[in-house]
Image: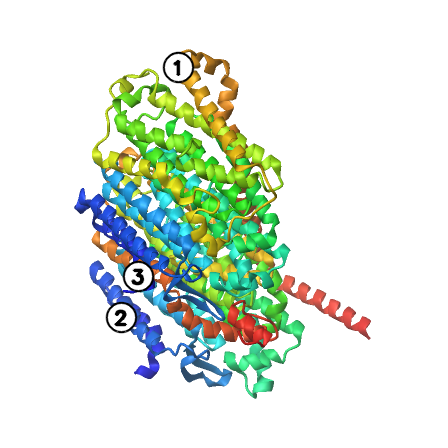
């Protein structure tokens, strides 16, 4: 049993979904409770993955391998390293909160909860798969439940948003599929038989001519850049975020976008190191544009959900900038920001949902003064705002600083321009908070209630982590750092890739 | 517990108070304020004890450090949560906890009856805690934690009465304006890491001389100074401080006069090694201080709101401190910081007492003759004003006098001349404030019926007045007590070219102070001049000064409005029409292609046959040419 930990974590939610789908006529509350139970148990099991994880080991751990379709070399192959470990935990952490936050969903509860659970399996599967085709199956599978959640339980323009989300990401995936099949066709020679195993494919990809590797890099890159999303491939995101129900937005921002960034690290960097290096300046420029662009566009949004959505474009730019700096600090910072953004933006969307359930508007112009009637809810909001603004002591600061530091070592302008977004973030987030919470209160909002117990249970865990990971980021980075170091060494073996004092001393070959 | 082992208590005690009051402050009622005050006092007591143990050491060994835990470790880059107490931070923690205690005590009375009483003290405690982290941090990143943390508390407290939109605006303006400087500072930190591989003071100070070129030092120093300019409200980032007066008055006294705004001065002092390698950066510091000092002094003269006079006066006085630091007279900058903390906190609390007695009125035109109604407030306020104006033997006299003395010997005579002009300006705005508020006849119903405040408010006034009066003994010359105490950290005041004799400097600045006070007495209190008529005649000039030379309007016209337009264009035109337009265009094109594709599939075998034939011919032609 313990040998199949990752499989259990991956498929537990699916099992729950199957039960729900078969259980016709389940009362709404039973469906909710069943989903809650499933996600909580999944989270607890995932904690034992964390417990078993060897922090200093950069190799894949808890690997499970089984032949699936022998004729085409398709395997069931899963495992975790310092990147996917945290992605899995972020996912299993955010799902129970999202289910609890969805208690107010009244329409087709059973189907809604089943979709959530299928989504969880697909997301976790994407993070643990070490076989390209297996990854692709999960990667595509997660579109369907998300499409259903947005299209079935979303806002007014939900159909448009859902279709746009689906087609946009599908279009990206088409390139990915071509790239995967091409690699598979080339693997027959060197490996002896065709394979999708990424560790074996690394040597296959290494033997390709540089130009071929670059084309393949681009095919993979497009698929993941859409998902991240990287400027200018981001326009599906504001629509999808705005129209999705609360939990949909939380999971979209919290974990789905991370699949894109994760794909860049896992596949682009590992399979095509030379091409990654070759395209790094271009990718970094897109990331920097995205960082500033997302922030500037967020400045004048009046719909609070759109505003947070554009802030995601900006924050995910930080992630990509850090990763493509190929310095120890940059890559670790980028991965750290994947976790931090999931928590902070997840919290913001949860809070936006709670405010919406009370005021029935997302229009900041129609709010105001809410801090008077709901001091705790707005207080929690302000806490999440300052986390997102990058206040030192809260989670985002350390990651942002590491990214700026790591990219600074490569190009001063990248780091400096990225820092500008820190000012812009303060403007758009504080302004939106002010329009929501400060000033005179609207007549019709004067009797609104503050947080209830269920909402406290949703918010308390995530808000606590914003503080915990701000004060003790080593809880995360100690397990990220070895993997990041390995990634950097793989891509950029012949450069100074560490800006810390220890490294400087090593490079000079002198004792301190 | 050993002295260095108890350093963590100093910021932890107020932090505990903040946590308690944030969670259950509402239930504590009036004890919330008492609890908060007690914890700051406790922090003060611990501070006194550890500073005492520091004094027991030899001058060169006066450093306590405490390692709490490793905060960040990524690759070879590591940052510890480490505290450092040396002479410089010792002076700072005594000011922060000492003055902080008095202001907390005062606030028990001042905030009485406020519906968010507990929350107010939670924020105030949190501020003290962050301020202590700022000055006790052993590396720049921990300093930055405090730096941003006090900014957060400043935001929360300026907007404490957030129901009024203007208060909320002022809070946001303060945070955003200072964050511009903070971000430059963060880039400076990144540069430092690239050079030193660490942000630890001990490493940077030890190896700066051999590591940094002049150019690199200048870049880093100026980036750090940008942070100081924001936090300490120097030109051109001074615009947030006058608006910050929207916060409750104890906040103005603690954060926007005595402590947070002096953090920039502390930063320059702390990092003076790098500023000195640059040299140019020091000149920039001195000139920024000088310009700010004069500019804000004139603005202070044009204000009618008693708190705004004090706000501009603070900006101006901070300018003096930067001027001193820029002339490498670091210990004098620190001494002025201490003296200013006393007399400016005193005057802000005095202004709060006046507002309390007059139903929250802040317009000096509606005051007058208050010294008869509120004698304690009046007398203590006058002590503070005379100290600021530099009247012998009050604390401000020594501070200003030493700065001018150093200025006269820098070889830049214009700095001395303009510094002396500044002394006159200070006397003018201070005299105007005092005579308009406390002398002459009562000019409103409220002024007629003003009443003195309760003891919990007047006791801090008296203590601060004593401090403002006698703090001069801390540094009666450029080789005084504070100067000698901090010398191991910041060096001694440089002996420049022989300047003007000290006696001449003293005589000139003292006479100008007296002249300034006398002139304002004649105009505003002697009854011989109809100052209201004079004011009408001088209106254009008065307007310019009242609006702070319209700097806000320029920023709004040059930055805010075009910025908003650009953002709107990006969002509504570029993003919606161009970026998304291309996406939807591709979608539409695919649909159109599919439609025409559908038309191809007519189901008529004839058409297919025709197409087949055409294809075959093409193939044949192609193959034919290849052969």
Residue at 41 percent of width and 80 percent of height? A61
- Considering only order in the chain, which callout, 3 or 1, is on the residue closer to the N terminus? 3
Kindly state the secondary structure of the residue where label 3 is placed. helix
Q: Gap in Å between the C-alphas at discs 1 and 3?
A: 56 Å
Name the mark nearer the viewer: 1 or 3. Answer: 1
Left or right side of B508 for A96: left
Picture layout, residue A20 above or below residue A2: above
- Residue on which disc 3 sits: B6
Left or right side of B437 for B486: right
Near-viewer residue (A56 or B236): B236
* Host chain of mark 1: B
Name the mark nearer the viewer: 2 or 3. Answer: 3
Near-viewer residue (B121 or A48): B121
Question: Where does residue B340 sit, x and y in percent of width and height?
Answer: 40, 39
Asked whether residue B354 appears in the rendered view, the answer is yes
Question: Where does residue B496 sit, x and y in percent of width and height?
Answer: 59, 45
Q: Gap in Å between the C-alphas at discs 2 and 3?
A: 43 Å
- Residue on which disc 1 sits: B526
Q: In which quarter of the image is the C terminus of chain B?
A: bottom right
Kindly state the secondary structure of the residue where label 2 is placed. helix
Residue at 57 percent of width and 73 percent of height? A491
């Amino acid at each position: 049993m313990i040998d199949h930990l990752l499989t259990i974590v991956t498929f537990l939610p699916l099992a729950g979904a199957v039960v729900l789908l078969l259980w016709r006529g389940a009362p709404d509350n039973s469906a909710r409770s069943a989903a809650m139970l499933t996600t909580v148990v999944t989270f607890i099991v995932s904690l034992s993955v964390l417990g078993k994880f060897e922090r200093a080991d950069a190799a894949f751990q808890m690997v499970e391998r089984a032949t699936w379709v022998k004729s085409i070399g398709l395997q069931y192959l899963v495992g975790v390293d310092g990147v996917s470990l945290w992605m899995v935990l972020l996912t299993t952490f955010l799902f129970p909160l999202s289910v609890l936050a969805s208690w107010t969903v009244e329409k087709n509860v059973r189907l809604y909860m089943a979709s959530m659970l299928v989504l969880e399996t697909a997301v976790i599967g994407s993070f643990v798969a070490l076989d390209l085709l297996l990854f692709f199956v999960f990667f595509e599978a997660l579109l369907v439940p998300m499409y259903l959640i947005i299209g079935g339980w979303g806002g007014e323009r939900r159909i448009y948003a859902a279709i746009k989300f689906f087609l946009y990401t599908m279009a990206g995936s088409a390139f990915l599929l071509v790239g995967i099949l091409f690699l598979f066709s080339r693997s027959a020679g060197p490996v002896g038989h065709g394979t999708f195993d990424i560790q074996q494919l690394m040597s296959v990809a290494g033997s390709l001519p540089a130009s071929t590797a670059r084309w393949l890099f681009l095919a993979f890159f497009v698929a993941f850049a859409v998902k991240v999303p990287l400027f200018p491939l981001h326009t599906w995101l504001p629509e999808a975020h705005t129209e999705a129900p609360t939990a949909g937005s939380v999971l979209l921002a919290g974990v789905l976008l991370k699949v894109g960034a994760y794909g860049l690290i896992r596949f682009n960097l590992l399979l095509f190191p030379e091409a990654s290096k070759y395209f790094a300046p271009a990718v970094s420029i897109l990331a920097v544009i995205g960082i500033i662009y997302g922030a500037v566009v967020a400045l004048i949004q009046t719909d609070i959900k759109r505003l947070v959505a554009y802030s995601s474009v900006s924050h995910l730019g930080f992630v990509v900038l850090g990763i493509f700096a190929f310095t120890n600090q940059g890559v670790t910072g980028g991965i750290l920001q994947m976790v931090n953004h999931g928590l902070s933006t997840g919290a913001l969307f949860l809070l936006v949902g709670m405010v919406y359930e009370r005021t029935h508007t997302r229009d900041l112009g129609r709010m105001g003064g809410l801090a008077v009637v709901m001091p705790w809810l707005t207080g929690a909001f302000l806490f999440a705002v300052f986390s997102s603004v990058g206040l030192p002591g809260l989670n985002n600061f350390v990651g942002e600083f590491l990214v700026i530091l790591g990219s600074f070592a490569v190009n001063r302008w990248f780091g400096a321009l990225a820092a500008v977004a820190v000012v812009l973030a303060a403007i758009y987030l504080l302004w939106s908070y002010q329009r929501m919470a400060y000033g005179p209160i609207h007549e019709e909002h004067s009797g609104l209630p503050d947080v209830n117990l269920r909402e406290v249970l949703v918010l308390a865990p995530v808000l606590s982590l914003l503080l915990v990971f701000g004060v003790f980021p080593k809880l995360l980075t100690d397990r990220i750092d070895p993997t990041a170091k390995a990634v950097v060494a793989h891509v950029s073996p012949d450069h100074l890739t560490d800006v810390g004092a220890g490294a400087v001393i090593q490079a000079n070959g002198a004792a301190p | 517990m050993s002295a260095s082992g108890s350093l963590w208590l100093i910021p932890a005690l107020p932090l505990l108070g903040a946590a308690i009051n944030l969670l259950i402050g509402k239930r504590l009622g009036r004890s919330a304020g008492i609890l908060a005050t007690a914890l700051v006092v406790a922090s003060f007591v611990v501070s006194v004890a550890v500073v005492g143990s520091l004094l027991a050491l030899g001058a060169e060994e006066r450093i306590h450090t405490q390692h709490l835990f490793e905060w960040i470790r990524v690759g070879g880059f590591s940052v510890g949560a480490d505290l450092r107490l040396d002479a410089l931070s010792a002076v700072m923690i005594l000011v922060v906890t000492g003055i902080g205690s008095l202001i907390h005590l005062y606030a028990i009375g001042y905030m009485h009856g406020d519906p968010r009483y507990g929350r107010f003290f939670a924020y105030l405690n949190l501020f003290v805690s962050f301020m202590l982290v700022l000055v006790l941090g052993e590396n720049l990143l921990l300093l930055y934690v405090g730096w941003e943390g006090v900014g957060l508390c400043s935001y929360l407290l300026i907007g404490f009465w957030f129901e009024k939109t203007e208060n909320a605006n002022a809070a946001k303006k303060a945070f955003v304006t200072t964050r511009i400087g903070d971000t430059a500072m963060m880039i400076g930190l990144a540069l430092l890491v690239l050079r030193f591989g660490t942000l630890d003071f001990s490493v940077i100070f030890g190896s700066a001389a051999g590591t940094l070129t002049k150019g690199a030092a200048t870049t880093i120093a100026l980036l750090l100074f940008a942070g100081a300019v924001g936090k300490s409200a120097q030109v051109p980032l001074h615009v947030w401080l006058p608006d910050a007066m929207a916060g409750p008055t104890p906040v103005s006294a603690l954060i926007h006069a005595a402590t947070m705004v002096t953090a920039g001065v502390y930063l320059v002092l702390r990092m003076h090694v790098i500023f000195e390698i640059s040299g140019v950066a020091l000149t920039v510091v001195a000139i920024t201080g000088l310009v700010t000092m004069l500019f804000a002094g004139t603005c202070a003269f044009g204000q009618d709101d008693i708190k705004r006079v004090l706000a501009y006066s603070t900006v101006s006085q901070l300018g003096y401190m930067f001027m001193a630091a820029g002339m490498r007279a670091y210990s004098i900058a620190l001494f002025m910081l201490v003296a200013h903390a006393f007399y400016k906190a005193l005057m802000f609390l005095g202004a709060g007492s006046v507002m309390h007695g007059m139903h929250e009125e802040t317009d000096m035109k509606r005051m007058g003759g208050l010294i008869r109604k509120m004698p304690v407030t009046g007398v203590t306020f006058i002590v503070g004003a005379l100290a600021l104006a530099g009247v012998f033997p009050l604390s401000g006299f020594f501070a200003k006098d030493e700065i001018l003395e150093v200025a006269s010997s820098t070889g830049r005579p214009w700095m001395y001349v303009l510094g002396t002009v500044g002394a006159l300006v200070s006397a003018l705005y201070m005299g105007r404030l005092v005579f308009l508020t406390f002398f002459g006849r009562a000019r409103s119903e409220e002024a007629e019926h003003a009443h003195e405040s309760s003891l919990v408010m007047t006791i801090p006034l008296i203590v601060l007045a004593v401090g403002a009066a006698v703090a001069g003994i801390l540094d009666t010359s450029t080789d005084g007590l504070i100067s000698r105490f901090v010398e191991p950290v910041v060096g001694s005041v440089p002996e420049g070219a022989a300047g003007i004799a000290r006696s001449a400097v003293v005589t000139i600045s003292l006479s100008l102070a007296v002249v300034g006070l006398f002139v304002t007495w004649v105009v505003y209190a002697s009854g011989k001049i109809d100052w209201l008529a004079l004011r009408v005649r001088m209106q254009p000039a008065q307007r310019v000064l009242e609006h702070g030379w319209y700097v806000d309007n320029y920023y709004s016209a040059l930055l805010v409005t075009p910025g908003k337009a650009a953002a709107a264009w990006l969002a509504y035109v570029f993003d919606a029409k161009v970026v998304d337009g291309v996406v939807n265009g591709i979608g539409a094109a695919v649909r159109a292609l599919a439609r025409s594709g559908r038309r191809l599939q007519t189901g008529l075998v004839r058409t297919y046959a025709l197409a087949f034939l055409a294809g075959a011919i093409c193939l044949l032609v192609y193959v034919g040419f290849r052969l």
